[in-house]
Amino acid sequence: MAAPGSVSERMNIVITGHVDHGKSTLVGRLLADTASLPEGKLQAAKDSCKKNGRVFEYAFLLDALEDEQKQGITIDSARIFFKSALREYLIIDAPGHIEFLRNMLSGASRAVAAVLVIDAVEGVAENSKRHGLILSLLGISQVLVAVNKLDVLDYDEGVFNRIKSEYGVYLETLKVKPLAFVPVSAREGKNITERALAEMPWYRGKTVLEVLDSFHNLSSKEDSFFAMPVQDVYRFSNDNDDRRIYAGTIVSGEVSIGDGVSFLPSCKEAHIKNIEVWASPAKTRAVTGEASGFTLEEEIYIKRGEVMVKSGEASPVRAAARLRANMIWLGSQPLGFNKNYLLKLGSDKVEVRLEKIERFLGESGDAGYRELRRHDCGGLVLSLARPIAVSSFSDNASLGRFVIVDGYDAAGGGIVLESLEAGDEAPPRISRDFEEELFAFLKVHFPHRFVNKE
């Protein structure tokens, strides 16, 4: 456990998997075994169980909602902090039940890495595959697979290897390569923070905590250019203060006083006059993750939603009105071609229409490429009412991840694969041979649920 104040960074990780596979128990163990619980919390939970004649479960440390306690399932996306010797974690305990996929999507959309939990007794469930697909669609490639409840099977190495092989092959088709498969017993605390050499001498890999610490937060590629979505523009009028402050949170790179900047999609240009701070020493530079305000040498009119980039810098941020994207649909009404929706990306909002469904995978069988129904996933082309500033998710998560709103309902979410020019169909991103192998594999694992566009 790190000494107080020694942790220098934070990482968001989502814990997911099929219902009853032990996600909340695993997180509860992480909290308890790293001494991250408030003083007395663990004993209070044990005392409460004893008083009510219940067997204590580490999941009780998380499942605070009444319905969760009664049914033994996670409904909300609980958010829990704990610290390792390396960093502080925000663990998002996402629901596994199919009815709460919206909550799972909401939780996963804020994560940079994931732990997928699989019950060794039940094996790879269809929801295990669905959750792997969602992580793939959201561009989360840093994955740890925890094969749980091995204590029930006397820590059988053969069971672990079979699950590792089956699920590993499936994740490979999604271009997700797990950093590790870890055999665990969350209930007994085996291979969570300490290695279980007595129970599993055949496993010589890392513990769950060690694998988490091997994940990384921000790639050098993502932080190699400056970008800041404009949240708001503030204008003051008191005491002859005529500043116009352009405010937002920097999602990549850095910028300094005197730098030339451009705003997308308007393409207006200016130079940074000052970096505004409140009740703090003056600054000459602002960097990734900082909520910042800027005044400019030139008077220009900019709206919320534009993205400030550095002039002359190589940047993947583009103004685009057509996007190729991967998306999951969770709306009560299908996503169809003849309706306007609202797309939210960064700090911008814009009307959007479905232009084309290129690939389809979901729960409703052959939709004839006419619509996406609830819990369906697809590769789409989206047409926007006007250009917005966007990058591919692989270049920047904040500018490549979006939500689609249907009325007042946050009905879908996904990631941008690339921006398209008008009439640009772009070549396939994978080879035809690989695509055919992928289709064939998914037809086996999702019978009657995968449609190949001919």
Image (cartoon, rainbow, N blue to C red):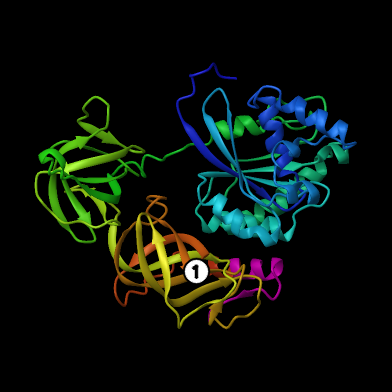
- 452 within the magenta span: yes
393 left or right of 16?
left
51 left or right of 451?
right
269 left or right of 285?
left
Residue 157 against residue 121 in the figure, above or below: above
Q: Which residues lie in the magenta part?
A: 438-454
The location of residue 181, given as percent across then percent down, is 67, 41
- 183 within the magenta span: no
Which sits in the foreground, 28 or 160? 28
For residue 325, which quarter of the picture? bottom left
The location of residue 420, given as percent across then percent down, is 33, 68
The extreme right residue here reads: 53
Residue matched to label 1: 379
Which sits in the foreground, 224 or 267? 267
Which residue appears at 65% of the width and 67% of the height?
442
Which residue appears at 60% of the width and 81% of the height?
367
14 left or right of 257?
right
Q: Does dot 1 land on a helix, a strand or a loop? A: strand
